[in-house]
């Protein structure tokens, strides 16, 4: 998580400015005090005067550019009452008007951020610092940067919690944002970043434990497809200008209309993070990975919504230590890939239901009785989790799996496990110094079926009734070696009597 934050904080400098310039006049102008006032007036009409009255934003002419200063200190002041202190150094951008109505933007302000909670038992703190430079082009017609690049020669962070202290250092960081027009007023925003020489040291407080994590390089990329950023900024502006709840209530009809028209808010969100040359120093020795990759994908509020997660790794090595028995080595999966997807929820219907019934003047804003309608929508879609073909590969052999499981209202599912290395895996498992392991291996081999040269186990299960079958063979609680057969007469896997059939119901 910290590794992602370090890269994303480098991009944050650009996104902060986007909210400042999106309402700017989309034409070139000579830099002057009048031009600065025109920029300020545009923002005031959209977000209200508080940004300038409180000193959060200031715009002044500076040579051929406008100096746009963001100082979030006033927004953090009220937090101190809860024993929390947050600070971030002001950031100054130089925005130069271009002939086509865009702005050339540069900044050399360092990014320094700190957080501290000093009251109560859960005292914690975070401090982040990075000397970064950035430049790019902001397009008011898109309300985003058409391009924006940030580079940091290094960055560091310190994190403290009741359980541990951690220090983080990073070498060079680069980040790039691009934005292009999408459909229906949306914008497709893409990011790409790199990071080198990551080092994190964690020191335990409750226990004398030190863990050091290093990574030679890290890369990240993400895409928000057809994001309706104009609508989001419009709604933020309405809320910012509203004096109180009554003002928002008077405009919530307009807000609902804008939100409904903007659905699904985005088409797809996707992201990938890859770490290379990972080393984790543990008390029993180093754990290393050549690479590990995580992929995520999330649709917008559409009828066939889905969320996907994929993890792929390569070159996993455990420490050579007596703590890990020799027989375990051939069974450690050095490579693996796992892909899951959650589907079956009509987010479009749920979003419209929530928007339609939202009323800021009520508590809660969405009535409790709406929950029953939302539940019917969820049940109608039969949410389920799908395991796409996934594999774990160890020196002794590889196991593959795929399947699906209903999540609601029933919890039935099927997982198919297969291997082309049954004999090698059986031999390696037979050497494991684990009670009943030889019987367990023999039991599993006896249940396997052969298809296309592979041993296959099709496992059907019901989470509500606890019924399980493998390749059509119903399992009772005493089926596996070492189980208690007292309730079924010891029929085990070979039983086909009425008692077993009843358990399968």
Image (cartoon, rainbow, N blue to C red):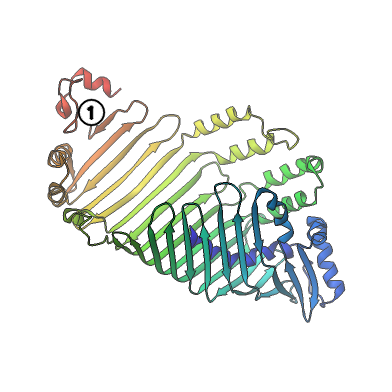
**In this orientation, does residue 143 appear?**
no
Residue 295, position as x, y percentages in the image? 44, 56
Whether residue 114 is situated above or below residue 92 in the rendered picture: above
Whether residue 359 is situated above or below residue 157 in the rendered picture: above
> Which one is nearer the viewer's eye here, 128 or 265?
128
Residue 324, position as x, y percentages in the image? 22, 55
Q: Which residue ends up furthest to the top in the rendered image? A: 498
Q: Quadrant of residue 303?
A: top right
Q: Which residue ends up furthest to the right in the rendered image? A: 34
Q: Residues within 10 Å of mark 1 (few under 14, many from 20)?
A: many
Q: Is residue 68 left or right of residue 275?
A: right
Of the 4 image quadrants, the one containing the C terminus is: top left
**In this orientation, does residue 6 appear?**
yes
Q: Quadrant of residue 36?
A: bottom right
Which residue is painted at 63% across and 27% down in the image?
Answer: 369
Q: Is residue 97 left or right of residue 87?
A: right
Callout count: 1
Q: Is residue 439 left or right of residue 181?
A: left
Residue 483, position as x, y percentages in the image? 19, 30
Local secondary structure at mark 1: strand
- The residue at which mark 1 appears reads as 474
Residue 499, position as x, y percentages in the image? 22, 19
Which residue is painted at 72% across and 71% down in the image?
Answer: 102
């Amino acid at each position: 998580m910290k590794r992602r934050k370090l890269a994303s904080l480098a991009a944050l400098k650009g996104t902060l400015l986007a909210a400042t310039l999106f309402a700017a006049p989309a034409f070139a102008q000579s830099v002057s005090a009048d031009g600065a006032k025109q920029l300020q007036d545009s923002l005031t009409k959209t977000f209200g005067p508080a940004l300038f009255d409180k000193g959060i934003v200031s715009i002044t002419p500076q040579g051929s550019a406008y100096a746009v200063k963001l100082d979030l200190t006033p927004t953090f002041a009220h937090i101190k009452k809860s024993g929390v202190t947050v600070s971030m150094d002001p950031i100054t951008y130089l925005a130069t008007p271009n002939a086509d109505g865009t702005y050339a933007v540069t900044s050399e302000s360092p990014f320094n951020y700190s957080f501290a909670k000093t009251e109560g038992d859960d005292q914690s703190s975070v401090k982040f610092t990075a000397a970064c430079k950035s430049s790019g082009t902001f397009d008011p017609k898109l309300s985003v940067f058409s391009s924006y690049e940030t580079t940091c020669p290094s960055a560091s962070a310190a994190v403290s919690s009741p359980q541990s202290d951690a220090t983080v250092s990073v070498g060079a960081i680069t980040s790039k944002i691009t934005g292009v027009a999408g459909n229906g007023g949306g914008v497709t925003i893409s990011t790409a970043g790199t990071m080198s020489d990551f080092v994190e040291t964690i020191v335990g407080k409750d226990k004398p434990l030190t863990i050091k994590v290093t990574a030679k390089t890290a890369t990240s990329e993400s895409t928000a497809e057809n994001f309706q950023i104009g609508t989001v900024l419009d709604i933020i502006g309405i809320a910012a200008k509203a004096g109180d709840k009554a003002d928002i209530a008077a405009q919530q009809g307009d807000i609902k209309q804008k939100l409904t028209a903007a659905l699904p808010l985005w088409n797809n969100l996707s992201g990938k993070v890859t770490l290379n040359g990972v080393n984790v120093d543990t008390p029993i020795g180093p754990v290393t990975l050549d690479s590990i990759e995580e992929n995520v994908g999330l649709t917008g509020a559409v009828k066939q919504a889905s969320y996907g997660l994929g993890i792929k790794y390569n070159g996993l090595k455990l420490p050579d230590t007596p703590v890990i028995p020799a027989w375990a080595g051939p069974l450690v999966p050095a490579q693996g890939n796992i892909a899951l997807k959650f589907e079956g929820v009509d987010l479009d219907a749920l979003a419209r239901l929530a928007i339609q019934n939202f009323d800021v003047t009520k508590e809660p804003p969405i009535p409790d009785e709406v929950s029953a309608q939302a539940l019917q929508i969820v049940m109608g879609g039969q949410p389920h989790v799908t395991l796409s073909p996934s594999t774990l590969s160890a020196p002794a052999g590889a196991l593959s799996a795929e399947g699906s499981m209903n999540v609601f209202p029933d919890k039935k599912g099927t997982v198919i496990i297969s291997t082309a290395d049954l004999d090698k895996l059986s031999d390696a498992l037979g050497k494991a110094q684990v009670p009943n392991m030889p019987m367990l291996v023999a039991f599993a081999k006896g249940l396997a079926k052969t298809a296309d040269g592979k041993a296959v186990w099709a496992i059907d299960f019901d989470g509500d009734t606890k019924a399980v079958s493998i390749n059509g063979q119903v399992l009772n609680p005493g089926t596996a070696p070492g189980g208690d057969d007292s309730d079924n007469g010891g029929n085990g896997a070979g039983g086909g009597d009425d008692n077993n059939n009843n358990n399968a119901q």
